[in-house]
Amino acid sequence: MPSRIPGPRESGRGGSITAAVVLALGVLVVFPMAFVVLQAIFPSIGAGSFAAPFSLIPQTFGDPKLVRWTLNTLALGVCVVLASTAVALPLGALRGLFRVPLAGLWDVAFLVPFTIPPYIAALGWITTLQRNGYLEQLAGFNLGGFLFSFWGVVFVMTLNVFPVVYFGVSRSMASIGGRYVDAAQVCGAAFWPMFRRIAVPLATPAMAGSLLLVFAMSIEEFGTPAVLAARSGFLVLVTGVEQRLSDYPVDLPGAASLSLVLVVLAGIAFIAQQRMVTGRDFRTLTGRPASGGPRPLGRWAIPCSALFALLALAATIVPVAAVLLTASTRTLSGGLAWGNFSTLHFAEIRANANGALDALVTSFLLGIVTALLTGLIGTLAAFVLVRSRSRAGRLLDFLTVLPNTMPGVVIAVGLILAWTQPWLPLTAYNTVWILLLAYCCLLLPYPVRYATAALRQLGPSLEEAARVSGAAPARALARIVVPLILPAVTAAMLLVFAVAARELVATVLLAPVGTRTVALFIWRQFDQGSIGLGMAMSAIAIAITVTVPAIAMFWLRRTGQGL
Amino acid sequence: MRTLRSLILAAATAAAAGFVFAGTAAADSVTVYTAGPAGLIDKLAAGFKQKTGTDVDVFQATTGKMMARLQAEAANPVADVVISASMDTATDFGKQGLLLDYQSPNAAKVPDFLKSANYVTQGISALAIAWNPKSGTPKPEDWSDLAKPAYKDLVTMPDPKSSGSAYELVAALASAPSLGWDLFKSLGENGMIVPGANDQAVTPVLQGAKAAVFGAVDYLAFGQIKKGESLEVVFPKSGTVIAPRPMMILKSSKHPDQAKAFIDYVLSDEGQAMVADAQLMPARTDIQASRPLIGDLKVLEVDPANDRDATLKKFSEEVAKN
């Protein structure tokens, strides 16, 4: 049986690492967040005034719709979490424990939903399923009634976010490896009891961590519920935030206060996650080569592959196909008629090649730098957090989830307020650095959750052995810990890259003058009513964005560090 | 050590590479914050650069996002010129003393109601019915037509809660004696949906899921017609609201001369022709355009004293039900 981690550990080890983590979290998370709180309290903080504190709070929280919006938000978050579990837990377990045919292909396919901006995915589903949409044009029926409902929102959002759980679970199960599974079988356990009593408990930290991310993402996501369910009267808290910032007059204090409600909801989810993982740390990552590796599926190979293919069809192929159809037809009203197909939109992007290339390069660099930085900071933060059992440690831990729970647009406001303070000796505002700060803040939660889960499986004994043999803390971390948790951190960094390369919500507000990113380029096309052009650029961006993770995965497989 | 060290090295190199493409505004450039249309500001910036040699740094967003950014950066403002899609922004900023007084010599032909001491209109849009002729419905002529059984469940409308001009349309029509709230009540009963911003209202009509947009932004619809979409713009008989797009120079501007020159350029023959080319109504009355101009429309006024919150609440009760 795997052994549990011993109790609280002495502090004071690796003090410089702790200091670096506290500093990084302070700059990336606490600094902008503090200004969101200040904005909620002091309406004129933007002009540097502390006048009339709390004056707008009663107005914001006196809104009778707030309770319903909060309940709707909770319902949506819980349903997306349940649906993601139902979809991603079995597939992640299969992927981690067994030799699934075409595993690498499925991994790449399940990364694609992450590279599609949520508003593009939602628009893809709308053009496919609404009355007279692509489905009706091809097959004669539509599913508009389903799509524009609460369950339609849950469906689309689950397909957008399940990869977080899939990659978390599959990496964790894989590191459990065949050893315990084999041991269970040697002891005569059948597959299901083994799965229920060995594999699932062992993967619980990873699952809890990724479900927390999913919950946080689904309560702060604006676009999908707004375009799909607002028409049927289903509004969530973020809708209220967005309404306050969508046209003149804007209400920054109101938006800031409402997002603090989201933080409270996320706090509850965080405590639930803590409960799930308390006492469930199992040292399964031993650094010893796994005996058998993943097991063959035997006669289950075909049905299992069919499951993977079905999910890839819904989550990847349908949205991408919708994007491609809109991009390669001259007009939306012309439909799927032969005469309407055209490479016009792609030709227009070629004609504007400078602008498009500029945007692609900027987004790419930002994505790569963000992935590397969050990977590094996330690993160090997880290292400090897992080893610390103090209250301060738990607070730091919550700080690393916080940014994921707030609407990106509010974080952007916090960043502007923070980085335009006149007393700052130098500022990142109105340079491309502000985007990097924003992306690192928004996406740090992924590497932290993934690395934390991996570290909980690792346990301290190997690192202790290194320390006893005379290695300094940083050396033990670099030589022992990092290589063992690298597959999990790499998976998180690929997700970060995919999101950072297409982030829109914070970018719209924060982009330095004259800077173009892919998402801004696409958004400007939609803003001008050029849907086909926007979709053509999306198709190009998705294709290019997927190649980086695909190459990374291929390379990791070759070097034996991945799966 | 090697893995961590190479990771740190890679992060540092990448961050340094970031510095290279970090752009800061050049010393004598002018920074313009604008609420679209994107194609227009790009052309204006290029034309201005060619004429004066001055670079134009553009930030483009919706009016709301632009205003949120302006409010948040108030301690350390970046913008020189602001072009918004809402007249209220100009009057409010003027009242708060944030604007620089400037009368462009090129503004002589701009009607008085489109300018003041510290702002001047760039161009004007109006709201209209955007109707898909392939929808199998009769062509609507007035707002109230869309409440008829022929359009049952076939009408969309941009959300007045997130669009200032849609709010003005609701306020104006609701206070018109012949229409009033009865119009919105019957639209709601006829299954009109309020799916979000302008493009979310238009997309279903283009694909034929719906037949008409109640209150579409006209220049965007004209642009889509130009691209070959099956769409027609109908200016209803009982009138509509217009949205002038005010240009203003912020008092905090560190480049007031360049900012003034930019306003002059937008109001020049060349600049106004670009505005007309974007399917907006030019602010100057002596500029030709290929679309109906302000004199061709029946313009409805909104009482400035109208209670915005009460109107939106009533709209929610009658139509959006949220």
Image (tube, rainbow, N blue to C red):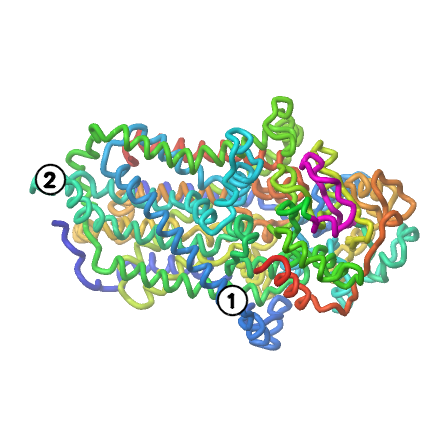
Element type at mark 2: helix
Look at the image and say whether residue B147 sits in the magenta stretch. yes
Q: Nearer the viewer, residue B35 or B319?
A: B319
For the C terminus of chain A, the quadrant is top left
Image: magenta residue range = B125-148
x and y, in percent, of residue A63 in the image = 56, 70
Residue at image location 71% in from the left, 62% down from the top:
B181
According to the picture, the residue beneath numbered tag 2 turns out to be A185
| Residue at position x 52%, y 47% in the image | A148
Q: Amino acid at mark 1?
A: Leu
Residue A308 lies, in percent from the top left, at: 34, 34
Q: Dividing the picture into quarters, in which one does residue B161 lie?
A: bottom right
Tag 2 subunit:
A
Viewer-proximal residue, A387 or A3?
Answer: A3
In the rendered image, residue B13 lying in the magenta stretch gets the answer: no
Residue A159 sits in quarter: top left
Residue found at the very far front of the displayed protein: B149
Relative to B277, A112 lies left or right = left
The residue labelled by disc 1 is A66
Quadrant assignment, res A175: top left
Q: Amino acid at mark 2?
A: Gln
For discs 2 and 1, the disc positioned in front in the rendered view: 1
